[in-house]
Amino acid sequence: MAGVWTSWHTAQYAMLVKARERGVMTVSACAAERCTGSYVPTGGDGRPRSRVTIAEAAAGGKGERVEVTVEPGTARAVRTGAAGILHAWVPFAGSLLLAALVVAGGMRLRRTAWVMGLLGAVLLGAAFAAL
């Protein structure tokens, strides 16, 4: 449950459309596991409006344009689209891998553990392949 809870804090912005502000971020600099860049809202006049930050793992590289949504009341951006959704669920994938060990060793449910472990590994692989 901790993996789901941790993942949901980011995944809700990447997955749910609601009335979230979406746009495009151009990565200009990366330091200390965060990247900053200019942000242009979708449907605007095409001019950068503000500077936002995003996790370095989700940003790609310097100069890259990334579709993002901005968390309400902050300058933190979350990547959207398939890559953003997969990246948001990485903590859940890790918890599946760890839980598979407990299920196999402690509960002796080997088939269930294999399924959990494989699902976690596939989700992690897909997340890193999408970025």
Image (tube, rainbow, N blue to C red):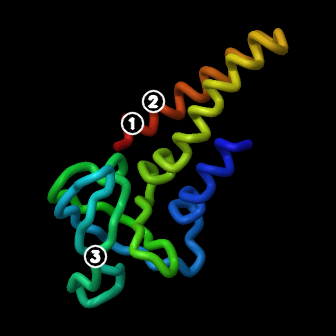
- Horizontally, residue 97 falls left or right of residue 113, namely left
Q: Residue 71's spot in the image, x, y percent?
A: 49, 72
Circle 2 packing at 10 Å, graded few (<14), some (14-19), many (20+), is: some
Q: Tell me the quarter of the picture where residue 69 sits.
A: bottom left
Say which of 30 and 16 sits in front.
30
Which residue is rendered at x = 25% and y = 90% of the image? 45
Residue position for label 3: 51
- Horizontally, residue 30 falls left or right of residue 8, namely left
Residue position for label 2: 125
Circle 3 packing at 10 Å, graded few (<14), some (14-19), many (20+), is: some
The CA distance from mark 2 to mark 1 is 5 Å
Which residue is rendered at x = 27% and y = 49% of the image? 60
Look at label 1 and name its amino acid: Phe
Question: Can you tell which mark lies on residue 128?
Answer: 1
Look at label 3 and name its amino acid: Arg
Q: Is residue 68 above or below residue 45?
A: above
The residue mark sitting in front, 3 or 2, is 3
Say which of 47 and 71 sits in front.
71
Question: Can you tell which mark lies on residue 81?
Answer: none
Q: Is residue 21 above or below residue 10?
A: below
Q: Are marks 2 and 1 in contact (CB under 8 Å)?
A: yes
The CA distance from mark 3 to mark 2 is 31 Å
User: Which quadrant is the N terminus positioned in?
Assistant: top right
Circle 1 packing at 10 Å, graded few (<14), some (14-19), many (20+), is: some
Which residue is rendered at x = 34% and y = 43% of the image? 131
The residue mark sitting in front, 1 or 3, is 3
